[in-house]
Amino acid sequence: MSVYLETERLTLRRFTPADADLLVELDADPGVMRYLSGGRATPRAVVEQEIIPLYLRHYRDTPDLAWWAALDRDGGEFLGWFEFRPTGREAGEVELGYRLRRAAWGRGLATEGARALVARGFGELGVRRVVGYTMAVNLGSRRVLEKAGLRYVRTFHEDWPDPIAGAEHGEVEYALDRAGWRTAPEYWEP
């Protein structure tokens, strides 16, 4: 296992094609997918033919900025994933995201992983700005972004072809730049 980052309770590593079952299972939980697809599962073919190849391309093109499988550090159980990859809009801007199994919710694991990635991004990788997006009604995800040091920027509305419940309230953007991170020492360590 190629470890990318470790925290007190998490190990983040690269995905491999052998992880397809883990991703299919994660996305099969309607609660996990509530704010992403309205609870609909991601088809196995999409995981195998689109998602995993996308992850592998990022490891090749931006080895330190990609998607990471999140495992329980003690037992090795798959907990979900974290995203920390270039947005493609501005040099040095990365998007922070996360998707955890329901059994991992409410334990501070999303915050722990997010803070560790933000600290590594600013402290080691030369990241200039970190952004995160979620539905305005997804209060849990918004709280994780806030606890990771990101601050509310704006609410905006997308024109989704198949909107899900809550979409009428819009999406929210949170962000943190290097200067803001440096002046908030409570976020320097995961």
Image (spheres, rainbow, N blue to C red):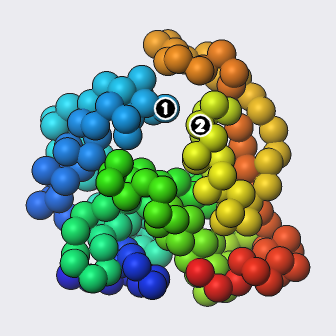
Describe the element under mark 1 as helix, strand or loop.
Answer: helix
Asked if residue 104 is positioned above or below residue 2 in the image, the reply reads above
Q: Which residue is mark 1?
A: 35
Tag 1–tag 2 contact (CB < 8 Å):
yes
Instruction: Kindly identify the residue that appears in the image at 68 percent across and 63 percent down.
Output: 147
Task: Pick the quarter of the image with the N terminus.
Answer: bottom left
Residue 167, horizontal then vertical, whole percent: 60, 20
Q: Amino acid at mark 2?
A: Asn
Q: Which residue is mark 2?
A: 138
Q: Amino acid at mark 1?
A: Tyr
Q: Nearer the viewer, residue 50 or 77?
A: 77
Q: Residue furthest front?
A: 106
Label 2: how many residues lie within 10 Å, few (<14), some (14-19) or many (20+)? some
- In the figure, residue 177 lies in which quadrant? bottom right
Relative to 179, is 139 on the left or the right? left
Asked if residue 37 is positioned above or below residue 83 in the image, the reply reads above
Residue 62, horizontal then vertical, whole percent: 46, 69
Residue 66, horizontal then vertical, whole percent: 44, 64
Asked if residue 18 is positioned above or below residue 164 in the image, the reply reads below
- In the figure, residue 9 lies in which quadrant? bottom left
Label 1: how many residues lie within 10 Å, few (<14), some (14-19) or many (20+)? many
- In the figure, residue 41 lies in which quadrant? top left
